[in-house]
Amino acid sequence: MPPWLDDFFWTYQNLVYALGVNGLLALSIYVVLAVGQLSLGQAAFMGLGAYSSAIMTLKFKLPFLLVLPASCIVPVAFALLIGGPTLRLSGVYLAIATIGLGEVLRAVYLNIDWFGGALGLSGIPERAGIGSIYGLLAAALAVLWIIGRSHIGRAMEAMRTDETAAEVMGINVPRYRLGALLASAVLAGLAGALSAHVSSFIGPNEYGFEPAVTILSFALLGGIGTPIAPVLGAWILTLLPELLRGLADFRLVFNGVIIVIAVLFLPNGILPFRLRRHGRP
Amino acid sequence: MNRRHLLTTALAGATVTALPAFAQPAAIQVGAVEILTGPAAAYGIAIKAGLELALDAINLKGILGGQKIALTVEDSAGDKNQAINAARKLIGRDKAVVIIGPTLSNEMFAVGPVTNERKIPTVGTSTTAAGITEIGPYIFRTSLPESDVVPVTFKKAQARGMKTVALMYANDDAFSKSGYDVMKASADKLGVKIVATETFGSKDTDFSAQLTKIKALKPDAIAISALVEPVSGVVLQARQLGIGPEVQLIGGNGSNSPKLGDIAGKAADGMIVGSPWFIAKPDEVNQKFVAAFKAKYNKDPDQFAAQAYDCMFIVAAAIERAGAADSEKITAALAKTSFSGVMGPFAFTSGRDPASADGVVVLEMNGGKFGIAK
C-alpha cells in the first residue's frame, strides 16, 4: 500500500468503523419501526452488548469469536423482559418502557463498581475490524432484505399500515412485534460489542436517551421502505460532522440545517421506495 | 433536486477541509483536540485561548531557527468518537507531530491508545483522573492530577483542627468519582476519620437528605467532589439547614471556579479549594500572562487557560530541544522538560505526570471571591 493511502485509511479508520456500527444500529431501529412500533431502547441494548462483551473480554479473557455471539444474549433477555408485557398493548408503551430501561441501566452502570462506575471500562483490546463489522452488516442487510421480500415482510408492512386490518387478516401481531424487538436487540447488541472492541473505552453516559434519539433519526432521515434506506441515513448522519469539519464553529449549524431541509422536503426519507414483492412464494 | 443539494454541500465541506493541509508547508504542525461546542465547551474554549496566546509569543521569534508552529484546534464536542476522529485527522492528514488535549479524561481514555499506538506524543492539559499516563509511553499531562492537589487542601484543613470529615460526591461523572477516591485516600493517610459518605447526581438540585444526615453526625469538615454547579447547590442548602462556619467546607478541583461565588455567593464563604494556579499569584510571569490574556480576549483567564498556556511553551521548548519536528525525538525531549511558567516550576516524573505539587495554592472563599487561604 502506498504511504499516502495508508495514512488516509489510518486517518479515517475510526470513521469507517463508525459507519459500519451505525449501519447495524440503523437496521436495529428499522426492524422495530417496520412493524409499526416505536422503541427508544436501541442505545440501551447497544450498551448491554457493549458492557457484557467488554466484561467477557476484560474479566473472563474469552476469545472474541465467542464474545461476539454471546454479546447478544443479555440484550435479548432484556428485550424479552420488556417486550413480553408491553407489546400486547397498543400505543406508545414500548417507547416509554424502553426509555425507562436506558435510564435504569445507566444508574446500574454508575453504581456498581464492577462496571467501572463513572470511570467506565477502559483498555478494551481492539479485536473487531473492517471484516467483522462489514461482514455482519452485509449479512444483516441480506437477511432483512430476503425476509422483507417474503410473506413475513408483507405481514410486517401490513401491520405498519393498518394494525387492525392486519390482525383481521390472520397475522399474529404480538408475535411479529416480539420477533422484531428480539431481532433489533440482537443487532444492537452486536453493534455495541463491535464498537466496544474498536474504541478501547466505554462509559455509562454513552447509552442514554440522546444516542437513542440519534439512532431513531437514522431511520427518520433514511426512510424505512427498504433495509438499505436507514443504513444510508446512518451513513449521512455519521459522515456529515466529519465532512463539515472545515467549517469550524459553524459545523453544527450546517449539520442541523442539512437535516432539517432533508426532513422537510423528503418526509418519507431520502430513499422512500418500497421493497418489490411478487406473489406469495 | 434536494439530493443534489445535499451532495454539493457535502462536497463543498470536503473541499474546505482539504485546503488547510496545503496552506503552510514550512510550519511545524501541532494539533489540539478540545471541546469547542456543547455543554462542556467553556473548558475547551479557555484552553484554546491559552494555547493561542502562548503561540503568539512563540511564533514571534519562531523555533528551530525561525520556523513557525501551526496550531490546528479540532472540536471533539465532548464526544468520544469525534475526539478519536479529530485526533486521527490531525495526525493522518495534517501531519501533526504533537497532540495537545483532549479536554476530558474520558476522551483521553479513548484517544490515548490511538495516538500512543502511532507513537505521537500527546499532552493533556486538563485531564486529572487517575490512570491517564498509564495508557502508554507517549501520553503526558501537564495538569496536576487530583491526587496531588487534594492532599494539600486536606493538610490545610487538618492544620485548622479537622479530625472528622463527611465526604460527598457526584457518582455519575468520572472526574468527581476520581476526586472522591483521592479525598478518601487523603483522609485515611492523614488519620482523619470519615464519618459519612454520601452521593448525588451531577444534575440533582435537592441535597437535603444527605445534608441532614451529615449535620446530625457533626463532622469537623465536609469535603465535596463534584463540578461547580452541584457544589454550589450543596453549599447553599447546607447553610439553609443551619450548617454554620464552624464546619470547614472543602472543595475538589471542580469547585475551583469563580462560578462558585457567582451562584452560591456568601454561602460559600470559608470553603477551601486547592488550585494549581491562582490569578493573583504575584510573580512576574503570571502577572504578564494575566495582562496579555486580558488585552487579547478582554476577560480574565481561568485555571484551564493558564494550564494550556504553560503547556504550549513546554511543547515548543521540547520541539526546540529535539532539534527536528520528529515525534520520537520530541517525546524524548518532553520527558526531560525543565520549565518555569505561570504555574511555577515544572518537570515530568518518569511516569509522565507533573513532578511537583509545589505550585499548589490553597484558596479560600471570602465574600463570594477566592483569595489565598491564611
Image (spheres, coloured by chain):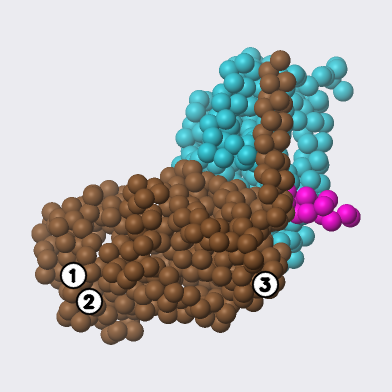
Chain colours: A cyan, B brown
Q: CA distance from mark 3 to mark 1?
A: 51 Å
Q: Which residues are magenta?
A: A1-15
Residue at x-position 60% and y-position 65% = B63
Q: At numbered mark 1, what does the secondary structure look like: helix, strand or loop?
A: strand
Residue at x-position 70% and y-position 55% = B26
* Callout 2 amino acid: Ala
Residue occupied by mark 1: B248
Res A154 label: none
* Callout 3 amino acid: Gly
Q: Earlier in the sequence, mark 2 or mark 3?
A: 2
Residue at x-position 68% and y-position 21% = B5
**Residue A27: within the magenta?**
no
Residue occupied by mark 3: B323
On screen, residue A81 above or below A68:
above
Instruction: Name the image quarter holding residue B293.
Output: bottom left
On screen, residue B325 above or below A204:
below
Q: Earlier in the sequence, mark 3 or mark 1?
A: 1
Residue occupied by mark 2: B157
Dot 3 and dot 1 within a common chain: yes
Q: Is residue A132 left or right of residue B167?
A: right
Closer-to-camera residue (B228/A136) = B228
Where is residue A210 shown, x and y percent of the image?
51, 40
CB under 8 Å between discs 3 and 1: no
Dot 2 and dot 3 within a common chain: yes
Where is residue B342 shown, x and y percent of the image?
39, 68
Where is residue A30 shown, x and y percent of the image?
66, 32
* Callout 1 amino acid: Gln
